[in-house]
Structure formats: structure tokens, C-alpha cells
Image (cartoon, rainbow, N blue to C red):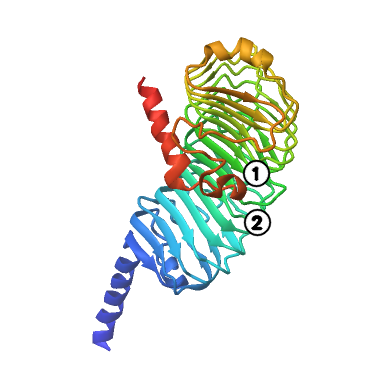
Amino acid sequence: MAIMKFLLPALAIAGMAAAADCDGQTIQNQGDADGLASCKTIDGDLEISSRVSGTISIDGVERITGKLTCKGAVNMTELSAAKLAKIEDAFMLSGLTTLATLKFDALTEVDSINFEALPRLQQLSFTKGVTKAGSVRITNTDLVNLNGIDLETVGDFDVSNNPHLTEVNVNKITNATGFVSFSANHRDLKIKFPNLENALNMTFRNASDVSLPSLKKTTGLIGFYSNYFEDFAAPNLTTTGDLVINDNSMLANISFPQLETVRGAFQIANNTNLKSVTEVPKLKTITGALDFTGNFSEVELPELKEVRGQFNMQSSGKLNCDPIKENVKPNVRGTFTCLGDVDDPQTRNPTSTGSNPSRSSGAALSGYVPPSGMTILALIGAVIRAAL
């Protein structure tokens, strides 16, 4: 009995010491998570084992200096952390095929978000809203919106293969410093960036609406591929890198009323309902090539004074090339082609980056441009242009 009098307090002290271990570690079960209740800060990475099941609730932790990750925990149905406000490295969830609830009431800041293969997750319960993230990647989830991601600035923003995602409204973003890409989500997806003014590189695929009312400048590519909207307008866009409008079968109207400079190639191709291109009244300079092909019968470029690359305009419609030859041809440094009433209008590899989104690897038909092609080369082109 005397031994027990000393042994029990010693065991209690040892248990307290273990519970007070706030270094990075792996959670194997809810008991491990409960052991972190006294830790306001986890110093290092916090990993959730692929062997966990059911509900994991991380209570007490307010900050993780490293990553929060969980990969392949196919039996975990719920993950929550009521007080966690900041993850200083990546927040990565992958292959959680039964996860239906993700509840982080206090989370406002992460270095990056990477959610992939979460087929049961329909909403993000981020009550305060994540306002700071260096990058966001969300792919192969069951999300219907991105409520809870309330960023002011972002680097890369990749949202793809979310079959029930119908709304993306990121009201506060004014600056996107990386690659913004949307593809293969719900056909009715509406994408709204109401306050975005500056971007590096943006591509939109398979969306029913894209709204960029405040956008003034993109340094690199802005591209629209295989979308379903009938109208697109960028009322405040003045300068962009490559501008590509390709294979949007329902598109009937485009408007760029303030656009003056395309620092790269300007391509419009395979938009079967687009009969005229007349709402680019201030366009003066294209530092790459111009490549318009389709079924249009009217094109007006009244202020175009310089095309440094080739000029290729071909239409199966009744396009009158005489005014274009008279007013634009003298300002073209490269080869000049303008043809109306042709059976098979042909693009001419126009992009300043050396790739053709309408012909390379079936890109226009699939709505996909391999990352080693247009996207990466557009970044290289943007860096070169910025240095000039």
C-alpha cells in the first residue's frame, strides 16, 4: 500500500507530462486528440492517421505552426476543431471518402488549402471565414458552393472536378497573384469575382457564367474555353496578356469597351454563335498575333494601330475584308490573312507562348490545356513581359 501511495501520484504526473506534449504528432484516435486539449499551440505538423474512424474533434488547439494533414482516412466521417484559428503551413485533406462534416468555427488563416477526393463533403463549416490563404486547391469534392472561403488576396486558386458546385462568389478578392483556374465543375456553375481588379493568369472552363466587373489588368493569360454562357463582358479591363476565347458554343456577344493593349496573342476561335466582334473599340496594340476564326460576318477594330505578330482572320460567314485590309493591314508586322466565306477557317498558331489552345492535344474540344503547355508558358511569357 505504501508503494501505491507513491506510484499513483507518479503515474498522474507522467500522464500530465504526456498530455502537455504539444510538439507535432500523429492522431491515431479520439483519445490522442483529447490529449491535446491543454495545447493552445501545436509546434510542428499535426497529422491525422489514415486508420482513424468516425469523428475526430480537436479541442483547445488555437494554432498549428506546421501542417494539418489527413490522407486516406476512408472511415473518418467528421473532422472539427472549434478553436483553431491559424494553420501556418498547408491544410491538406485527401482521399477521405466518407467525410461529410468539416467544422472549423474559428479558422481564418492558412498558408494553403488542398482538398481533394472528398466525395461526401457538401459544405465547408468555416464560421468566421478563411480570409488569408496563399493558395487554394479544391478538386473532386461534393461541395455546392465555397462559402467559408472569404479571401482578400490569393495566389493560385484551382477549383476543378466538383460535379455539384454551382456557385463561387468570392466577394473580397481584389488581387490574384497566381493561377486562377476553374474546370469540369457543374455545368450551371456561376463564378463571380465582383471586386477583383488585378490578376496574373486566369482560365475558365465549363461554366455557365463568369463575372469580372472590376477587373482592370491581367499580366498573363486570360482564357475562356468550352463555357456555356451567351454573353461575356469585361467592362473595365484595359490591359491583358494573351486573350483567348475558344470553343464557347453558346457565346453570342463579347464586350471589352476599355481594352487598349493585349501584351501577347488575341485569339477568338470556334465560337459558333458569335456572329460579330465589334465591342473592342479602344484596342490599339497587340504585341503578339491576332487570330480570329469562326462564323462571324462583322469585325470592327477602329483603333488598332499595331500588331507585332501575324494577322489571321478567317470566317465561314460573309465577312467583308476590304475595310480591314485598308485600315489594319498597314499596321501588321507579320503575315496578313483575311478571308471570308471559307469552308474551313484555320487558326495559325497565334499565341506568343508558342502553343495553340485550339489545336494542341485537342485542348479546345476537351477544355483542358496541359500544365506543361499554355499555362506554364503563359507564366514564362508574363515574367518576360514584366521585365521589358
132 or 336, nearer to the observer: 336
Name the amino acid, label 2. Answer: Pro
* Residue 305 in view (yes/no): no
| First along the sequence among labels 2 and 1 | 2
Report the side of 331 relative to 384 (left or right): right
State which quadrant residue 378 falls in.
top left
Residue at horizontal 67 percent and vertical 42 percent from the top: 227
Q: Residues within 10 Å of mark 1 (few under 14, many from 20)?
A: many
Q: Is mark 1 on a helix, strand or loop?
A: loop
State which quadrant residue 25 falls in.
bottom left
Residue at horizontal 60 percent and vertical 19 percent from the top: 259
* Residue 166 in view (yes/no): yes
Q: Position of residue 346 (x, y in %)?
A: 60, 36
User: Which numbered tag is attached to residue 163?
Assistant: 2
User: Which numbered tag is attached to residue 226?
Assistant: 1
Q: Is mark 2 on a helix, strand or loop?
A: loop
Q: Position of residue 78 (x, y in %)?
A: 56, 65
Q: Where is residue 19 in the image (x, y as percent from the top left)?
A: 35, 66
Q: In which quarter of the image is the N terminus?
A: bottom left
CA–CA distance in space, label 2 to label 1: 16 Å
Count the numbered circles shown.
2
Report the side of 28 relative to 260 (left or right): left
Residue at horizontal 68 percent and vertical 55 percent from the top: 164
381 or 292, nearer to the observer: 292
Residue 1 vs 84, above or below: the answer is below
Evaluate if marks 2 and 1 touch, with contact meaning CB atoms under 8 Å apart. no
217 or 352, nearer to the observer: 352
Name the amino acid, label 1. Answer: Ser
Q: Where is residue 6 in the image (x, y as percent from the top left)?
A: 25, 79
User: Which numbered tag is attached to residue 253?
Assistant: none
61 or 183, nearer to the observer: 183
